[in-house]
Image (cartoon, rainbow, N blue to C red):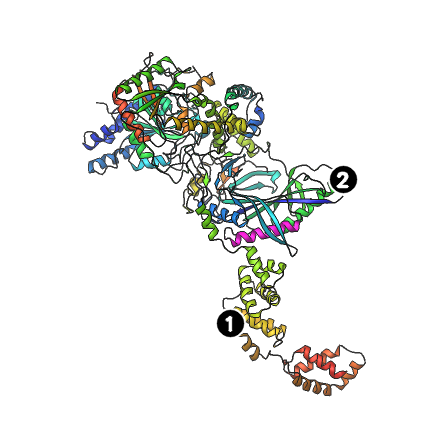
Amino acid sequence: MKIVPTIGMETHVELKTNSKMFCRCNVVETDKPNENLCPTCLGLPGSLPVPNKRAIEFITLLALSTKCQITTDGMFHRKNYFYPDLPKNYQISQFDLPVGTEGSLEIVVNGEFSTVEIERVHMEEDTGKSTHIGSGRIDSATSTHLDFNRAGIPLVEVVTKPLIKSSKEAVSYIEELRQLVIDLDISEGKLEKGNLRFDANISVAYENDDELGTKVEIKNMNSLRSLEKAIEYEISRQTKMLNNNETIIQETRHWDEKKEVTSSMRSKEGSADYRYFSDPDIPNMILSKDFIDKIKNNMPVLPSEKRNTFINSGLSIEDANSIGKSPKWMGELYKSVSDITNDSKTTFNWITGELQGQLRKLGETSPPEWMTAEQLAEIISLVKNDKISFTSGKEILAELIEEKINPEEYAISNKLIQENDTEEISKMVKEIIKENSEVLERIANGEEKLIGFLVGQVIKLSNGKVNPSVAKELLLKEIK
Amino acid sequence: MTDKIDIKNVAKLAALKLTTEEENKLEKDLSMIIDHFAALSEMNLPDEKISIHPLGTPLDLADDEAIIFLSHEEALSNAPESSDGQFVVPPSLD
Amino acid sequence: MNHYKLSISEINKLFKDKKLKPSELYSEVFERAANTESIIHGHLTLFQDENIKKAADADKRYENGTELGILDGIPIAIKDNINIAGYATTCSSQMLSNYISPYDATVITKLKDEGVMFTGKTNLDEFAMGSSTENSAFGPTKNPWDPSRVPGGSSGGSAAVVSAGSAIASLGSDTGGSIRQPASFCGVVGFKPTYGTVSRFGLVAFASSLDQIGPITNNVEDSKILFNSMKGFDPFDATSGKESKTKQPKLKNAKIGIIKELMEDGISEDAKLEVQKVAKLLESQGHEIVEVSLPLTKMSISIYYLIAPAECSANLSRFDGVRYGNRVAGNTSYEMMENTRAEGFGPEVKKRILLGTYALSAGYYDAFYGQALKARAMMKKEFTETYKEVDYLISPTTPSDPFKFGEKSDNQLEMYMSDLCTIPANLVGMPAISIPTGLSSNGLPLSVQIMSPANTDNTLLEFSQKLESVVSFTSLPEIKGGVS
């Protein structure tokens, strides 16, 4: 019987507000530990939380853009557990009345559309940072150092329903969510900085089983690559166990980046009874129709809308998805250039291939400011109309990245314009044949690769202006 | 309420280390109080949306304007142990 | 002449008329403290030396006519669960015996702006949990009227120092009666404002939905002055309220309800007689007295002892020895926290943390905490309905006069019952005041409590001022061993 996996994702998105979630301490990157603190985020006696308006606007924006229902009379809850990086030993979070519920997000997997169901979108606060001092392993640490700069930074937790079917789908989902928070301008969205942190809940079951298998939570996946590998590893581990009739236990497992395996985490002392209750320091949060409408009316273009525009311009779903997740300038440049060239695929290839490649080699993240869509369209057209060779096009592009030039003028002055006039080329071909009777003989005797030599001679004669394919075609005609 | 209070588990949740003597006394004291709650627990009360603020006042969200409150030195001034500007505790296990 | 029993406005007039200087009053109050504190133990710390310069500054302001307001130069004591920057905030707990607050509570900032001088920090039941100050880790406070009796609690120190005259007034905090009950036991005025009118920022939380800071004073007018200087919305406290327009109760020909449930079992004859005496006085002033029934009042102890411990179980989680507090070593951080909390907290605090943890734990939430929330909401409705019929409610403040040390410490439920009359105001959020009105058969102070609808604080205070003048309670304690 076929065994199928089921995956649910829990993602924490760090919001880019000026101040923390429940106090007005600065949210800035600093190397200095314990710099941005106040009685509230340090959990001093007598301090109180006051929620950040912008954070609530941001989460509402995210909830609306994932088609969630908005809880208009919500509240905050305390999640109680003891851990030294949690200043109050409870985290202010949301329990049964999160800001958003029952939403969905359209994603692209293997060139096709798919939908991820969102269960909830809720607001909470981050913890401090622990550094374990000692031999490098948690188990043998001699002490733990605590920096609370991160404590209290607003986090949105996005929880999907357990309906994701593969590691690829999970990765695509994270990519889409990342693009969404970047386009909404609510988070830096940098995985390497921990702006987006995700855990996966994975279970396996026989395909015709009504019930889901026992879920295992996987933590510590720091990149999309490790997410994909960890899910695949875990699915195969659980599948083997199910095949061998072994019992899968509900637990949290840790992804080991080096060994590429998941391993059981030592469970925290005490059972996980978080004793959620409504935080008496924070009154009910009423989100008025005005508040929600204002956010709705200022909604930026969403990644899915952007993607549809690209599809409508003629790109495949895959390409449209890819350019939508590229740096912003690429999508914009693509749109302007393809409007001129009327050739979506070629434009896409030039921008995502040649241009991005050359920039990357130079260590640049975006094209020079003087580069215009017209210039790029001109290069593309010159190549497309066989006025210049592809190689010359690349050369002109490289030059354009270096300095402000006019592509056509550059092509002319550098004699890159190809001769496409067959009559002219025929004359040159005949001349070359006349001069190379020996070579012709050898070709007749089977040394066919010498045709290339003759093509080269024609190009030389023309000072490089001849379109090589035209020259070859005419040469072959003459020889036969 | 007929349930016996599991004092060991409750103490663990509350991160309170109790002596056996304390456990016995507290178990007795708490049971007595919990028994006193029986009349309330058995009342039939309507299920209504609870207002967190006793007066029903809704939340006023704060503007996202950062301020500086404590200096680094003030933040660490009461630390039982610190090193390199960080609070230090015995090893914490995940 | 002694000045420490004068009203704030009388003192202010003497200051302005240059008949008394703030520094002179200050010396007098500290001399009074020197004579009484060894018996009363109301202050945990006295800020004597550091105030010499402040008193001299206040002198100058009055000389130059640049005084900051009616509270300029007035010595006021602060309960030691309210943070003053640079000073210890111990909450009468071993846990915080060395903790120095790096910031001011909002009420402290406000009073500093008015030129108030702080006499020091006053004793309380550990983390404000108790009704006698017997739960203080630093020894109990004695009742100035009879040192063999408790001053009440948890703001026992704040009530005792006003009664004894070692401060002109004080601040307390009231979660279930912690201002009013000790004020009653010490024969002074105690006022718990409407929930949220005074910022809680900087008050070490016991039960966030019930806690409220308020004044303890020699007379109602002083309470009114202090309340109005402290009240107002605070951006650091999301539960603090902006002033809202509310229909005010009547000052003349008012209708006053005696709460039937607070005149029954468990209330002493003395206490009942006191309410009846005051009711007659009110009637003679043209008010109408009626009996009202608020059945859920009978449940208030149960509701309170579920909600308050549940909230406190989380509020006190932060005391773990990580960032502050007296750390007790352990091999792991969890062990360190467990040991720190085991040694830092006293028995009553542990009991309430465990009770609250239990009430919130899996499987018990609905029967206990959830049920208490529903009952609280119902109780609020009962009061709202009743206030449609009456302007004020009246009851004893305490079921009896002050009890003796040890008398109730072995019977927890009886101890909890001493808050029976005061708890409803916290559960409902309404203002309540305790006014001394007479002496019991033991010669100890008795008080009545008057309550009014939420956000009618100043009307309640004005009404109480009128009652106070009719009652004219002028008895003062004679502190044996001290200089009276």
Label 2: few (<14), some (14–19) or many (≥20) C-alpha neighbours in 10 Å: few
Q: Which residue is rendered at x = 24% and y = 31% of the image? A: C22
Tell me the residue that label 2 is attached to.
A244
Say if mark 1 contacts mark 2, CB within 8 Å: no
Q: CA distance from mark 1 to mark 2?
A: 67 Å
Q: Nearer the viewer, residue C342 or A303?
A: A303
Which percent across, then down, holds residue A282?
Answer: 45, 37
Q: What is the span of residues highlighted in magenta in the rendered image?
A: A167-187
Numbered disc 2: secondary structure: loop
Decide which of tag 1 and tag 2 comes sooner along the chain: 2
Which percent across, then down, holds residue C234?
Answer: 37, 39
Q: Which residue is rendered at x = 46% and y = 22% of the image? A: C299
Q: Nearer the viewer, residue A303 or C61?
A: A303
Is A179 magenta? The answer is: yes
Which label belongs to residue A175?
none
Instruction: State whether the magenta stretch is mostly helix, strand or loop.
Output: helix
Which percent across, then down, holds residue C121?
Answer: 36, 28
Q: Amino acid at mark 2?
A: Asn
**Mark 1 belongs to which subunit?**
A
- Image: C150 above or below A192: above
- Image: A202 above or below C221: below
Q: Which residue is rendered at x = 62% and y = 66% of the image? A: A345
Q: Nearer the viewer, residue B49 or C232?
A: B49
Q: Of all residues shown, which one is farthest toward the right?
A: A445
- Asked if residue C236 lies left or right of residue C68, the reply is right
Tell me the residue that label 1 is attached to.
A404
Q: Nearer the viewer, residue B11 or C462?
A: C462
